[in-house]
Amino acid sequence: MGTLINKRILLGVTGGIAAYKSADLARRLRDADAEVRVIMTQAAAEFITPLTMQAVSGHPVHMHLFDHEAREPRAGTALDHIDLARWADAVLVAPASANFLARLAQGRAEDLLGAVCLATAAPVAVAPAMNRQMWDNPATQANLAAIRGNGVGVFGPGAGSQACGDVGPGRMLEPAELARLLAELFATGELAGLTVVVTAGPTWEAIDPARGLTNRSSGKMGYAVAEAAAEAGARVLLISGPTALPDPERARTIRVTGAREMHDAVHQHIHDAHIFIGVAAVADYRPVQAAAAKLKKQDEALTLELVRNPDILASVAALQPAPFTVGFAAETENLEQNARAKLESKRLDLIAANEVGADRGFGVDENRLLLIDRAGVTELPAQGKAALARALIHHIAGRYHEKSRIKNSRQAHRP
Ligand code: C5P
């Protein structure tokens, strides 16, 4: 079962009488802990006011592609359609009018909603609502076939009495049902039956009882990866360094402090794992000996002697048999080259490389990843960490199943 917790849902509202239910839908999505932003078409505003949708979503409504179209101060910037397209984990257009379905089928981008549907990499679903004759019309059915062919989800419509007095297909599904179907979009089942171990967060290498060496990792990416793996159906164990984040809902979480403790926890649990994803920013060195009591100021200079920590990722990849092993490479320069060198030296199946700097990678909410393996490079464009984690899990699932297929067919052909 998928969930809407922490999902960023872009709710598109088009012109139809069912738009009065969009307010209830927005409220239900928020009750399910989703974040909701609303785009309305001009026609939608004939049926329900932007103020209502602003009140129930908690954010100003987006309506215009261009600044000069707005009569009042408006939300966002001239690049709204790109920003919103990247922001969304899913786009749901409810109600979707016959006119909107026609525009979506053609990939038209003359208004904000059409442009966002074209520009987003997130899944898009529509909840059609229209008179039954309009629904049955071959033109509408041809548009639907085209939309489905483009990978857009079609929720409903239901059948029953209509605002126009007709009875038949064309009623928008009820908000509770739409929220359920939307949550299901996220439950891919790609890792069903598999066990995944994820490391996340920084490590803390004690200098004395009050001080330590650590880094700027917030743990957000690793936690999002654990969530996404669980959502894809895996049994997930998250081994986390110290973070301010709550344990993910559906992963078992073990909290550790230093790299050696993380190493031991990983090796205690790795034997029945199919996939290992090392997202933690593990300290390469630790003080030779943590002082038992707080160090006092003495001389002008103090030398701290450090020793190497075990490389957790490389030690997992070296196991016989090893799980499908995925590493992360946070680099400030020569991203692809440095990441590829790590892929080889640590004998990984895949490495996810991201650029870090003052304003990138650590602690920020948006990120870009290059996924590098022996078959090539795949770029996951900048997006929220939750969406990025889902895209990463999708990629890992594909590669994992491909590797298992090759291994099984080799075994089958062995004399
Ligand atoms: O070599 P570098 O630290 O850049 O490699 C990063 C990758 O290796 C990350 O996936 C990180 O989780 C992992 N790593 C590890 N143990 C270490 C150092 C890094 O698992 N001691």
Image (cartoon, rainbow, N blue to C red):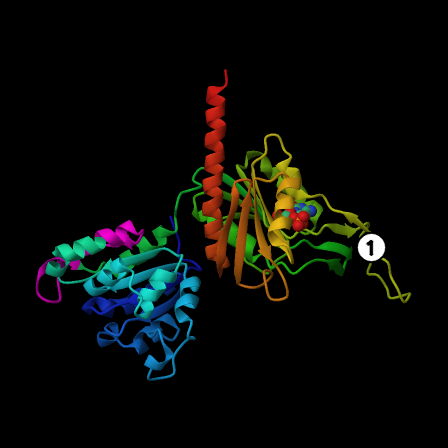
The answer, for residue 228, to whether it is visible in the render is yes
Residue 173 percent across, percent down from the top left: 23, 58
Q: Is residue 45 above or below residue 299?
A: below
| Left or right of 295, for residue 184 | left
Q: Tell me where the magenta segment starts and ends, as one range.
A: 145-170
Q: Quadrant of residue 343?
A: top right
In magenta segment, residue 156 = yes
Please provide percent x and percent y for residue 288.
81, 49
Q: Residue furthest right?
A: 299
Residue at x 88%, y 64% (from the top left corner):
301
Residue at 30%, 52% (x, y): give it.
150
Residue 274 in picture, x, y percent from top left: 52, 36
370 up-or-down from 359: above or below: above
Total marks in image: 1
The residue at 60%/66% (across/down) is: 359
- Identify which residue, 179 or 189, lies in the foreground: 189
Tell me the quarter of the picture where residue 245 sits: bottom right
Residue under label 1: 291
Whether residue 161 appears in magenta in the rendering, the answer is yes
- Can you name the residue that lies furthest to the top here? 415
The residue depicted at 13 percent of the width and 58 percent of the height is 160
Ligand 1 under 8 Å from disc 1 Cβ? no
Amino acid carrying mark 1 in the image: Ala
- Element at label 1: loop
**Is 15 situated above or below 177?**
below
Q: Is residue 18 left or right of residue 38?
A: left
Q: Residues within 10 Å of mark 1 (few under 14, many from 20)?
A: some
